[in-house]
Amino acid sequence: MRTAIDTNVISIIWSGDPPAAEAASLLGRAAREGALVISAPVYVELMAHPKATQHLMDHFLANTRVEVDFVIDEPVWRETAKRYASYALRRRKSGGGEAKRRLPDFIIGAHAYLCADRLFTLDPQRYAQDFPKLRLMWYGLPYPLGSVAR
């Protein structure tokens, strides 16, 4: 089982906020179940964390055995474009105006969908609508219930 990790999971662990212990425990569980990976956009977002340094990043990645997928191939970009365009169209049709969600979320979602078995996130609703077949790990449970891997 290969688990892609969203920025918010590692960010909450680094912050030490109340859910940090549970998030760290679940990250450990995911590691016992298989490989862990972050996409390049997650790496970039994490480097903007207030506590981030290159040393912290390198140390965290080494200790947790999280791989960084710096190379994002054409299929991920095409999937990102398809999902983001669909979202933008849905938003315009609803009268909501221009797209409000950030493009990195779609890259992270497409990367997880095509390059991992699931995405560990603290914001499952964000991905469930635009990636309905992506298996999501959220505080240890698949979300939404009954979701299936691609």
Image (cartoon, grey):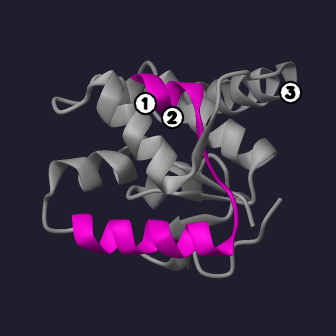
Is residue 6 among what the camera can see?
no
Question: In whole angstroms, how far apart are the C-alphas of marks 3 and 1?
Answer: 21 Å
Of callouts 3 and 1, the N-terminal one: 3
Q: Is label 1 in contact with label 2 (beta carbons under 8 Å)?
A: yes
Residue at 51% across, 23% down: 103
Residue beneath label 3, please? 75
Front of the two marks 1 and 2: 2
Could you say where residue 141 lies in the image, as x and y percent from the top left? 52, 80
Could you say where residue 125 lies in the image, as x and y percent from the top left? 46, 58
Could you say where residue 44 lies in the image, as x and y percent from the top left? 44, 22
Residue type at numbered disc 2: Asp
What kind of element bears circle 2? helix
Q: Quadrant of the C terminus?
A: bottom right
Residue beneath label 1, please? 101
Residue type at numbered disc 3: Pro
Tell me where the magenta segment starts and ends, as one range.
20-44
Is residue 122 among what the camera can see?
yes
- Count neighbours of disc 1 (C-alpha within 10 A) and say few if under 14, some if 14 to 19, many if 20 or more: few
